[in-house]
Image: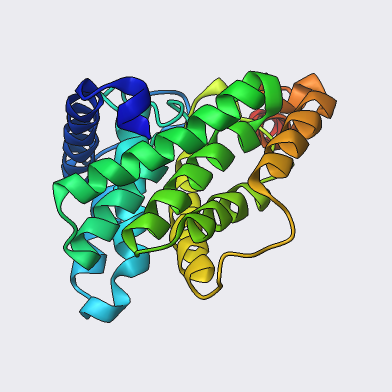
Amino acid sequence: YVEHCEGPSIWGYLEQCWRVMQAAIERGYEAQGTLPGVLNLKRKSASHFSQAKARPDKLQRTGLLTAYALAVSEENASGGQIVTAPTCGACGVMPATLRYMQESLACSDLEILRAMATAGIVGNLVKTNASISGAAVGCQGEVGTACSMAAGAACQLLGGTVAQVEYAAEMGFEHHLGLTCDPVAGLVQIPCIERNAVAAMRAVDCAEYAMLSDGSHEIPFDTVVETMRQTGFDMQARYRETSQGGLAALHKSKQAVAAVKTNECA
């Protein structure tokens, strides 16, 4: 279907995207130090990766998924090259999920590209019928969409039917409904980076859950997309990427109180 709509050149484009995703992972989990910005946030991918590799194979899943997602998100936060899948703020979910699935299942690059094509359909459905912008609908449109895309792709790599793939994508999206976009200090770091790691884990969970079913479920994907759109438009502006509400506002107020106490002690 994707090749019919986009033409054969789509595979070369997806291959390039996959190369960039993998390069971002490898740069990210080798980097040390702190990220740019006032938060002085420490990079964590390298630590997650080394600790995961030190564990028995059966206990590596969480460490590897989070290491890969953190790697790409940390690269984004430091100005590195990433793939918007679907956005910069949600760029770690797809690469982490695909890399983990390829390593776990020994998938070929062609299988990965086909899974990426499926994920692209999911993302385009959201973008066309709702929004993938945190400024428009909150983080449910960014990380929620990324999780949905990754869950569908992972389910396909597990051998899922069309119904199971749709179920995985729907599930990954449904359980991000209402998620706000409240970046602390206006930076795509807290809670964004950690959120990518959690969404990558959730994507694989959704894929495996869907594979345990026959693909039938009550809420169709399209309904979740429309629900997300309505929910996002109902959100007050302070929860849509303005850093004026939620974690951003609370963290800022606590910092201000701490600064006052420090000055009083001085």
Of residue 47 and residue 219, the one placed in the foreground of this image is: 219
Say which residue appears at 57% left-offset and 65% top-offset.
215
Point out the image quarter for the C terminus: top right
Q: Position of residue 43 (x, y in %)?
A: 32, 42
Query: Which of the 4 image quarters holds residue 236?
Result: top right
Residue 189 appears left or right of 78? right
Q: Is residue 31 left or right of residue 93?
A: left
Query: Residue at horizontal 54%, vertical 52%?
Result: 166
Q: Is residue 256 above or below residue 46?
A: above
Q: Residue at coordinates 57% horizontally, 57% vertically from top-left?
A: 167
Does the image show residue 238?
Answer: yes
Give residue 124's position: percent from left, percent from top. Answer: 50, 28
78 lies left or right of 209: left
Q: As rendered, which of 28 and 201 lies closer to the eye?
A: 201
Image quadrant in which the N terminus is located: top left
Q: Quadrant of residue 257?
A: top right
For residue 46, above or below residue 103: above
- Give the side of residue 152 with respect to residue 54, left or right: right
Colour setting: rainbow
Answer with the quarter of the image where residue 74 lies: top left
Query: Would you say residue 250 is visible in this rendering?
Result: no
| Residue at left offset 41%, top offset 59% | 155
Q: Position of residue 70 (x, y in %)?
A: 35, 45
Q: Nearer the viewer, residue 101 or 71?
A: 101
Q: What percent of the width, then of the height, locates residue 121? A: 46, 34
